[in-house]
Amino acid sequence: SADEQQFNDLIEADSRIEPRDWMPEDYRKSLVRQISQHAHSEIIGMQPESNWITRAPSLKRKAILMAKVQDEAGHGLYLYSAAQTLGATRDGMTEALIAGKARYSSIFNYPTPTWADMGSVGWLVDGAAICNQVPLCRASYGPYGRAMVRICKEESFHQRQGFEILLELMQGTEAQRHMAQDSVNRWYWPALMMFGPPDDDSPNSAQSMAWKIKRFSNDELRQRFVGMLVPQAAVLGITLPDPDLKWNDETQKYDLGEIDWTEFHEVLSGRGASNAQRLQRRRDAHAEGAWVREAAAAYARKQSERSEMVAS
Amino acid sequence: SADEQQFNDLIEADSRIEPRDWMPEDYRKSLVRQISQHAHSEIIGMQPESNWITRAPSLKRKAILMAKVQDEAGHGLYLYSAAQTLGATRDGMTEALIAGKARYSSIFNYPTPTWADMGSVGWLVDGAAICNQVPLCRASYGPYGRAMVRICKEESFHQRQGFEILLELMQGTEAQRHMAQDSVNRWYWPALMMFGPPDDDSPNSAQSMAWKIKRFSNDELRQRFVGMLVPQAAVLGITLPDPDLKWNDETQKYDLGEIDWTEFHEVLSGRGASNAQRLQRRRDAHAEGAWVREAAAAYARKQSERSEMVAS
Amino acid sequence: SADVAEYALWLGDDSLVLAQRLGSWISRAPELEEDVALGNIALDLIGHARSLLHYAGTASGQSEDDLAYWRDEPEWRSLQIVEQPNGDFAHTIARQFIVSHFLFELYTRLRDSTDATLAAVADKAAKEVDYHRDHSVQWVLRLSLGTDESRRRMLVGFSDMWPYVDEMFRDEPLLDRLEGVAVRPSSLREAFERAIAPVFAEAELEEPRGFIASGGGRRGIHSEHLGLLLADMQVLTRAHPGAKW
Amino acid sequence: SADVAEYALWLGDDSLVLAQRLGSWISRAPELEEDVALGNIALDLIGHARSLLHYAGTASGQSEDDLAYWRDEPEWRSLQIVEQPNGDFAHTIARQFIVSHFLFELYTRLRDSTDATLAAVADKAAKEVDYHRDHSVQWVLRLSLGTDESRRRMLVGFSDMWPYVDEMFRDEPLLDRLEGVAVRPSSLREAFERAIAPVFAEAELEEPRGFIASGGGRRGIHSEHLGLLLADMQVLTRAHPGAKW
């Protein structure tokens, strides 16, 4: 059709698709799935870090951490808005999350038992997220791409803060250095898994790349991430917990140790450390806030009735 | 009347009045007021101590403190039962407490900011309570007297435990000794106030004494209490915070410093440190437990319906 | 001077304790917009606390973190209202409404302090607290006039927080030594009442009567809630004496 | 031996953490009778914890309090289920129902331990835990069959606690070195299922399906709840190193 032709031309020309443009139903669905999943990840991703807001070890760190978690709430809001331009409703997305029907990034099903995890989450998790997300700033769907521009700017700030937390710990007492290394040991592999299964085992990727929703393969992004980590780990004086990790001059890539995809699939299927806790907490916050949302809605209704009465 | 004569004879003979005996309405009312007030004091009195259950500094102390607070719940139960034999209902008493219409001992409107307060509450507050209560074991109303026998036995155990907490602190580090002295400074005067206003200013006492519900005057009990404290304070090495306190050979009594009855009346009229907190907490626990009590009642109803069906 | 430092400590402690309470809401708020809004308010308050504690510590060579993490409960000078538990959202809003109105009047006046540092902090804070005030006013209206349930909760929230209002406006002896530097809280009550009256009128609320807590936060006397708040707040820092973060 | 000590620590930590949770109910229970009942259970558990931690400490010259107050979170060996928050009363009952049934099977079997101390502790504990089991069974029935609201809450309570059931029955390598001394938790699951089945049948409940937490408490891996529990529990003791109480 002419619509389809125009859509394909726009994609071909690296132009943006906007909400009012025609788009294939699968493109729309795929985007809603990806954007809402991303939004859910921001929302659930607040939890592992909010765990340390009350206990942050200095006022400066407390302020930075609060601001960060709050940014994540903000990212959730932009992304929900972007998904809404595709016809998804916020209530619908929220219900799907709470009912356990919507996915969010599995990485947030790991717990944050120590303060050093605030460093690792920033350095490794946000770091991996940036590698995933920077290309999305050029995503073909306009509202998503623009949301990602703003998000990436903040994420890279978060990553630097995570690095600084680890740096401070690695320059600190022995207990602090140990805390940092232990934390990186726990987060390194899960962070690598954030790029998803190897390319030869990744079903949705091809179409997403054709539509320019996705622009690099999982393995390409993983390589880019490790390439970024290695020199930073040297600065930190921290060891990346992969004895097989080394630069391969022939392939011009890093050789990586075997990733434990069994763990990945276990966590994905609800058998991680904190899946239950994360959803329980979101469900409880949502349920406990119901009366507040209802009050706000009732008040808004009454106000608009009143202004109508005044107007008529 | 013959009933009245029999009642008076029983009182005269120091015999017990039992639930089925005739009694003057004012006697009943006075008892209900006193017993329910005493029950409420046990219930509210759990709060200042439960404040330290999770933070008790050794497992032994944690166990002792738990047992103590739990004893108080038990005392509340005996006393509610005794009041119920006089026609009061537990729901009615509970509602009166939560609505702020029923009194409880003002002493529990003081907070327990430090662990040493677990010592002072035991030594001073339970000590004063015992002085008040031991005579009540001979109270003319049977169920009350018998409840008091059991309660007094446990209270004197609690008092000894409070003394031991203070003793351990006074034999400890400087910080511990300071904590103990500071706590006794805060609790001594409020404990003296527990005996109520001076005799010449105590409206309900005369009738209660005639009915042998009460057997010693406020000032007599206060003297007895101070007489007990002085040698124990010497053992502890703790200073009672009354520079005017000394034995008077002439009167054969202790001279006491001036008690600040303004403070007493302030606290009594709802202007103490913790009045609001105490009632709020009781109200919240009661409200949050409503669905549990309803479930238990519904289940009991269904069970008895079922057994009736089986029987018929 | 030590007196000015003590006064800065009072105000800094108020902000820090309240920020700590609000921080617990983040990721648990009734809607995402409130995670953001309460987070913003908490961040502003932490900012005020840091400035004030930093200033308070200069007299004695202590850092903001020395003061925040290494003082025990009786050394805290915060008002009892800020340590009151979050409760449900209505309790948090009631507390925020009361404290924001108090702080707005306070900082507005403190901008004229003869102490340049306090005046500068106050100038920045007054603007921010004005926004906090507005946020809580909106919620007081929504909750009071929204549903029966929300109105019931708003009433309970105010009635549970009101016992701690009196303490805010009490003058302590320290103020006699800080004429021109500090603001007498007693002098703020009228403006406070004037500011909240129209909101209460529109929300169809009355000031609760009943308990009045005896207070004493400025002298280190606290309700039973502060100890637990500090246990949590200080646990990590105290486990690593001397460490930097 | 160090292995026996480690095993005693596991069981002691379970009891202590659960007692700590239950202790928070005292003065807040839905009715006075439950203040008493939950207090009794907590006291029994503290008793078990003290015996077991005392025994665990003899190998290394540590007291029960050294172990209770001076270990950091990763050194705790408790199962993740015991550190789960109290939630509402249904959550507490679900947790207690599960753990009491587990402990009953465990202690019943541990009475035959070749280690005389463990056998003696188990003998006493089995009787007490049998009562705890009964208490929770009664409440599971009341809440499941009481009102719609209570049934709804009981279902949520079980579904929130069930993810932590699997971990209880996992064998750790230590057990290979304690044949005859310790009980293999994997060997208890059948008896556990057999014991709860009739209660679930009468209560018209089914075992929840869904999440299964990856666990790891025996290796010091905990949910995010334990750190806060310890912050509170240890704060006073740690503020006074070396003090006696």
Image (cartoon, coloured by chain):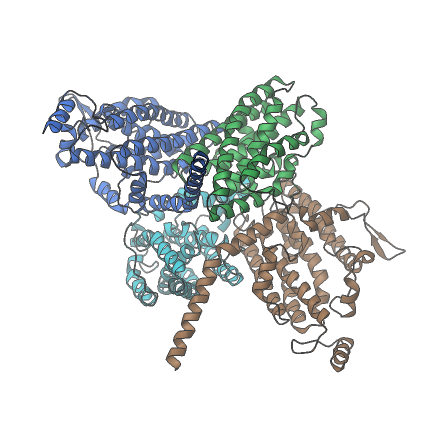
Chain colours: A brown, B blue, C cyan, D green
The reply to whether residue D238 is in sight is no
Residue at x 73% of width, y 51% of height: A233
Q: Is residue C191 above or below residue D125?
A: below
The reply to whether residue A275 is in sight is yes
Q: Choose between A279 and C97: the one closer to the eye.
A: A279
Q: Choose between B50 and B145: the one closer to the eye.
A: B145
**Quadrant in the picture for residue C243:** top right
Q: Residue furthest left?
A: B1
Q: Choose between C239 and D224: the one closer to the eye.
A: D224
Q: Choose between C101 and C33: the one closer to the eye.
A: C33
- Find residue A145 and report its horizontal and vertical position in percent: 68, 70
- Find residue C198 and report its horizontal and vertical position in percent: 32, 68
Q: Is residue B149 above or below residue D35?
A: above
Q: Quadrant of the N terminus of chain A?
A: bottom right
Q: Is residue D211 above or below residue B215?
A: below
**Quadrant in the picture for residue D125:** top right
Residue at x 35% of width, y 40% of height: B111
Q: Is residue C184 left or right of residue D9?
A: left
- Find residue B166 and report its horizontal and vertical position in percent: 38, 27
Q: Is residue D101 left or right of residue B41?
A: right
Residue at x 30% of width, y 47% of height: B99
Q: Residue furthest right?
A: A250
Q: Quadrant of the C terminus of chain A?
A: bottom left
Q: Residue furthest front?
A: B312
Q: Count all numbered tags in the image, as a single digit.
A: 0
Residue at x 23% of width, y 40% of height: B264
**Quadrant in the picture for residue D190:** top right
Q: Is residue A189 left or right of residue C131?
A: right
